Image (cartoon, coloured by chain):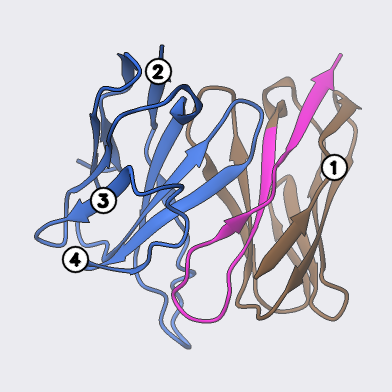
């Protein structure tokens, strides 16, 4: 597709269940980012991928959160044993890698997000 | 690390001009971005500044002063559809993730 695609758009789950959120980035974008946005809050960085590797996992809130990216394309964010405080919109974004002196700004293109509600 | 500060809420009148400020403290700097986010929608890119000065794009302009750690987004001829949150984001050197401020919720009233 032309843009970043995320699924599911909405997910309601019970506390303690595992959830998987999927992101399909723009074709050719090497960098992929996961952010979380709670109601009325800014975007909280979780993890990013350059190709299939994750240079920065510092934003993951706990070891219940993990993410992987395969084939330099689709990424999955997994939350195990969900808690009510995990309720938020999980936003995925992709970008071309910014190159020194290049015209590309490295701007992020966001998907519509996956709204997670943990009961 | 990065610390980004912007006002929480602003209100302005249709047809007027509004300036949304953003200040940042960083260990490094490689560009500042402004994004617009309507309620329930994805953030969309508005502007990018990496050098000092003003970047103009239609009704929207963005200014950067790296020595002061300061940027603003200027919206002219406000329209009701401009009611949204405006997010300031800063990038460290290298291909590192953008760090976002909490956003400024702008309400445009008639």
Q: Are marks 1 and 3 on the same chain?
A: no
**Can you give x and y, in whole percent of width and height, for residue A116 in the image?**
39, 23
Residue to which mark 4 is pinned: A52
Whether the residues at callouts 4 and 3 have beta carbons within 8 Å, the answer is no
Residue A43 located left or right of residue A41 = left
Mark 2 secondary-structure assignment: strand
Is B86 magenta? The answer is: yes
Q: Chain of mark 3?
A: A
List the single residue furthest toward the bottom.
Answer: A101
Relative image position of residue A23 (x, y in whole percent): 25, 42
Residue extent of the magenta highlight: B85-110
Question: Which residue lies under the disc numbered 2?
Answer: A118
> Which comes before the other along the chain, label 3 or label 2?
3
Identify which residue is drawn at 41% across, 47% down. Answer: A62
Q: Which chain corresponds to the colour blue? A: A
Q: N-terminal of the two: label 4 or label 3? A: 4
Q: Position of residue A22 (x, y in %)?
A: 22, 38
Give the x, y percent position of residue B42.
Answer: 48, 34
In the picture of the structure, the residue carrying the numbered disc 3 is A67
Query: Label 2 vs label 1: CA separation?
Result: 30 Å
- Measured in 3D between alpha carbons, the distance from the residue under mark 1 to the one under mark 3, in whole angstroms, is 33 Å
**For the residues marked 4 and 2, what is the alpha-carbon distance in whole angstroms?**
29 Å
Q: CA distance from mark 3 to mark 2?
A: 19 Å
């Amino acid at each position: 597709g032309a843009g970043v695609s995320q699924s599911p758009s909405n997910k309601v789950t019970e506390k303690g269940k595992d959830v998987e959120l999927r992101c399909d980035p723009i074709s050719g974008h090497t960098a992929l980012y996961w952010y979380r946005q709670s109601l009325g809050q800014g975007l909280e960085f979780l993890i990013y991928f350059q190709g299939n590797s994750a240079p920065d996992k510092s934003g993951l809130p706990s070891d219940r959160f993990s993410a992987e990216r395969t084939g330099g394309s689709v990424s999955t964010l997994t939350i195990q044993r969900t808690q009510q405080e995990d309720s938020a919109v999980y936003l995925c974004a992709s970008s071309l890698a910014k190159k020194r002196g290049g015209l590309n700004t490295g701007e992020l293109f966001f998907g519509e997000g996956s709204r997670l509600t943990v009961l | 690390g990065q610390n980004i500060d912007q006002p929480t809420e602003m209100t302005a009148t249709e047809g007027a001009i509004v300036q949304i400020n953003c200040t940042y403290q960083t260990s490094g700097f490689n560009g500042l971005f402004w994004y617009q986010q309507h309620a329930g929608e994805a953030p969309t890119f508005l502007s990018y500044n990496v050098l000092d000065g003003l970047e103009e794009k239609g009704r929207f302009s963005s200014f950067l002063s790296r020595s002061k750690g300061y940027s603003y987004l200027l919206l002219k001829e406000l329209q009701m559809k401009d009611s949204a949150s405006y997010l300031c984001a800063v990038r460290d050197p290298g291909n590192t993730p953008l760090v976002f401020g909490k956003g400024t919720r702008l309400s445009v009233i008639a």
